[in-house]
Amino acid sequence: MTRPPVVLVIAGSDSGGGAGIQADLKTAMALGAHATTVVTAVTAQNSLGVQGVWPLPTAAVVAQFRSVLDDIGADAVKVGMLGTADLVECVRALLEPLHGRVPIVIDPVCASKHGDPLLAADALSALARDILPLATVVTPNTPEAELLLGVLAGESVIIETSSAQRAAADALVAAGAQWALVKGGHCADPGAAGEATDILSNGLEHRAYTAPRSETVHTHGTGCTLASAVASGLAQGMDVPAAVNLAKDYITGAIARGYPLGSGIGPVDHGWRWH
């Protein structure tokens, strides 16, 4: 038996099973990778929202990271929910030795699908200034890109059109990321009715990844899933545009087959390729 590509995931746990570490594990498996995990926080959440968040001590995060990396290694790293400034600083110190050696995908998780905050204000600033420059790819949706760029620019940033998406992706690259993928699911550009377009930039070249919008409310876990899919592609040796193409195809299918679970917003279907 050969060793599969390994994605080291640093993220929070979702007790509802649709996002966070749980989504990362299912995505990696669906795309032929093995995910190891470093849990940064435990949440109590379900289809209706987040009822509680408990960040783990930094010592626990360091111990998990060293345990899996030193023994198993990593072909790519995916970073999701960090939550506090202390955890941001802890993860920055852990990732710096890997920068330039292992692809790092940063999903700047700021809030849940219901709008519940998952990142403290001081942690947002630390994430923008200290974690972003370590990213091989950063994968914000437009509200997250607005927050990151607002912190960096010191003024409000609004992204409502595809041209603004492109400018935001370029600005995130200028801030230190090698590539930026600004997702368009929240972007209501009237010229793209019925479609959602993600813009990928490395500051020199731009690629657009467009897919039909699905008529569903069951989209819990989309951000975590897409970032983990990109990391799974990179772990297999793909370049960034190819990994994003893989991820866009996977998340589009998963969203189209999202299903009801509980009384609120259900998850995307991570197993759609197996049905």
Image (cartoon, rainbow, N blue to C red):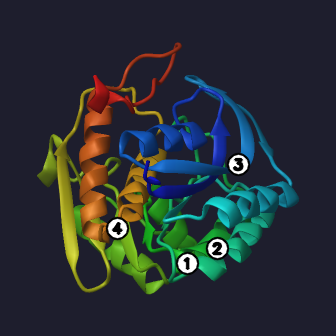
Mark 1 lies on residue = 134
Q: Amino acid at mark 1?
A: Leu
Q: Amino acid at mark 3?
A: Val
Tell me: 105 left or right of 215.
right
Could you tell which of marks 4 and 2 lies nearer the N-terminus?
2
Q: Which mark is residue 237?
A: 4
Helix, strand or loop under label 1? helix
Give the spatial CA distance, label 3 vs label 4: 25 Å
Give the mark nearest the N terminus, 3 or 2.
3
Sooner in the amino-acid sequence: mark 2 or mark 1: 2
The mark lying in front, picked from 4 and 2, is 4
Whole-percent x, y for residue 23 in the image: 50, 38
**Which numbered disc flags the more N-terminal residue, 3 or 1?**
3
Count residues near mark 1 (Cα–Cα under 10 Å), then give few for <14, some for 14-19, many for 20+: many
Q: Are marks 3 and 1 in contact (CB under 8 Å)?
A: no
Q: Is residue 224 above or below residue 95?
A: above
Which residue is depicted at the point 79% across and 63% down?
62
Q: For numbered disc 4, what is the local secondary structure?
A: loop
Q: CA distance from mark 1 to mark 4?
A: 19 Å
Task: Decide: few, some or many residues near mark 4? Use Cα within 10 Å; few <14, some 14-19, many ≥20.
Answer: some
Which numbered marker is on residue 39?
3
Q: Nearer the viewer, residue 268 or 145?
A: 268
Give the percent coordinates (x, y) of residue 108: 54, 59
Please rate how many residues cluster around mark 2, counting C-alpha atoms within 10 Å: few if below 14, some from 14 to 19, many from 20: some
> Which numbered tag is attached to residue 95?
2
Q: Are marks 2 and 1 in contact (CB under 8 Å)?
A: yes
Q: What is the CA distance from the residue labelled 3 to the residue labelled 1?
A: 20 Å
